Image (cartoon, rainbow, N blue to C red):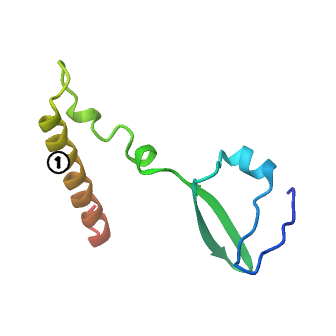
Amino acid sequence: MVARTSKMTRKGQVTVPIEFRRELGIDEGDSVAFERAGDALIVRPVGSVVERTRGALAKYAKHPPLTAEEERAAFEQAVADEQVETDERIRGYR
């Protein structure tokens, strides 16, 4: 395991070493998640909304391309479907 050090500022900010940013594909403005694992702190990249939802409309794809209204309706349906699936998983139905 490769370790690097960085000093924390009085505002609680630290610099993620460039080697790790490159390996993880973290760029300026990207979001990261912090997770505690015992006495360790895990930092992992969190994709953007666009990256997390990429392909969400694929099952609703039509040719010719959708109109703006159809695209909005398909997006809203995809979000609703995903929420139902999430709710069912949380409640243990799946």
Q: Quadrant of residue 46?
A: bottom right
For this view, does 86 lie left or right of residue 42?
left
Q: Residue at x 80, y 56 (%)?
A: 17
Q: Which quarter shows the C terminus?
A: bottom left
Of residue 70 and residue 61, the one placed in the foreground of this image is 70
Q: Position of residue 91 (x, y in %)?
A: 27, 72
- Find disc 1 in the rendering and name its residue: 77
Of residue 12 and residue 73, the one placed in the foreground of this image is 12
Q: Secondary structure at mark 1?
A: helix
Q: Which quarter shows the N terminus?
A: bottom right
Of residue 41 and residue 6, the one placed in the foreground of this image is 6
For this view, does 34 lie left or right of residue 12?
left
Q: Position of residue 49 (x, y in %)?
A: 41, 51
Type of amino acid at the residue the image marks with label 1: Gln
For this view, does 75 lie left or right of residue 15?
left
Q: Residue furthest front?
A: 10
Q: Quadrant of residue 92?
A: bottom left
Q: Is residue 80 above or below residue 25?
A: below
Number of residue marks: 1
Task: Tell me the crowding category of disc 1: few under 14, some 14 to 19, or many 20 or more residues within 10 angstroms, Cα based.
Answer: some
Q: Residue at x 41, y 45 (%)?
A: 50
Q: Is residue 67 above or below residue 2?
A: above
Q: Position of residue 26 (x, y in %)?
A: 65, 49
Q: Is residue 4 above or below residue 37?
A: above
Q: Residue at x 73, y 45 (%)?
A: 23
Q: Quadrant of residue 35?
A: bottom right
